[in-house]
Image (cartoon, rainbow, N blue to C red):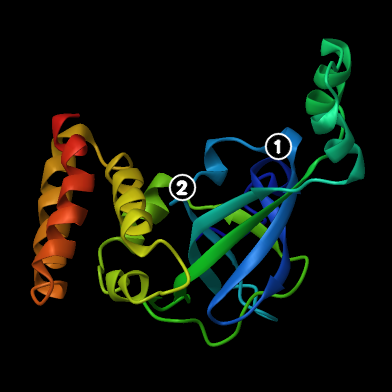
Amino acid sequence: MNDDHDFDAATLRIGRVLRASTRGFDCGTHSRHIDARHDFGALVRANVSNSRDSWVVGLIYKVEIKDDQLISELVMGEAVPEAILRDQRNNRLIPVEIKVLNVGYVTPQAIVPSLPPRPPMSLADVFPCDDEEVRAFNQQMDYFRIVLGASEVPSDDLLAAALRRAALAYDPSQRRNFLETSGRRLARDLSHDMKRLAHLLALLEPMFTL
C-alpha cells in the first residue's frame, strides 16, 4: 500500500474514521463528496492505530445519508420550491456515514487476510484502494471466509459486489480468469451449502459478459 505522503490526501480521502474496532469501522464525510469510491463493496484502507506503515483493509457494506430536523420538515412539505431543494442538495453539508467490514491488513512484509491487530484511530483518513492494491489484495482469497461468516452484513451481496469491483481492476484479458479462480475458491468454501454457492455464482455471472 502506498504511503499517504505519496499523493494529495485531501483529494483522495473518502472520509475520516468516526468509531472503530478490530471487526470494522465507521467513517464520515458529507454528501457533496459522495461518488463511486463510496460504493457498496468498495475496498478501502486506513492506517492501523499508531502505525504509519500498516493499513487496515475493509469493504464498504453500508452507506447512510443522515437526516436532521430541517430535512424532516422539507420532506413533510407539500410544495417545496425547486430552488430550495437544489440548495439543500448542492450547498448544505448533509452528513454521510459509511460502515466498513475489516477483511485484512497490510504490513511492509505481507498482506494478511485476517482481522487487524488494532483498529484505526478516530479521525484517521480513509482512502480507496487503487487498482494495483485491489489486485494485490485479491491474490489471496482467504478473506472470503471473513465476509461469508459476517452475520452483521449482507455477506453474499457484499462479497459478490467486491468481486465484481475487483474484476474491473484487471485488464479485460485477465478478467475472466480472475472470476473463474474466484468461483473455484467459492466452490471450495461453500461445498457444504450448494444453494448459497449457486446464488453467489449467479450474482457474478453478468461480469463474464464484459
Q: Is residue 158 above or below residue 71?
A: below
Of residue 63 and residue 193, the one placed in the foreground of this image is 193
Q: Earlier in the sequence, mark 1 or mark 2?
A: 1
Residue ID at (34%, 77%)? 149
Q: Is residue 122 left or right of residue 201?
A: right
Residue ID at (65%, 73%)? 52
How many residues crowd around disc 1 within 10 Å: few (fewer than 14), some, or many (20 or more)? some
- Please identify, in this view, whether the residue under mark 1 or under mark 2 is nearer the observer: 1
Q: Is residue 42 above or below residue 32?
A: below
Residue ID at (91%, 44%)? 69
Secondary structure beneath label 1: helix
Q: Position of residue 73 (x, y in %)?
A: 89, 35
- Residue with the mark numbered 2: 130
Q: Position of residue 150 (x, y in %)?
A: 40, 74
Q: Which mark is residue 208?
A: none
Q: Amino acid at mark 2?
A: Asp
Give the quarter of the figure containing the C terminus. Answer: top left
Residue ID at (13%, 63%)? 195
Q: Is residue 93 left or right of residue 177?
A: right
Of residue 133 and residue 80, the one placed in the foreground of this image is 80
Q: Amino acid at mark 1?
A: His
Q: CA distance from mark 1 to mark 2?
A: 18 Å
Of residue 146 and residue 156, the one placed in the foreground of this image is 156
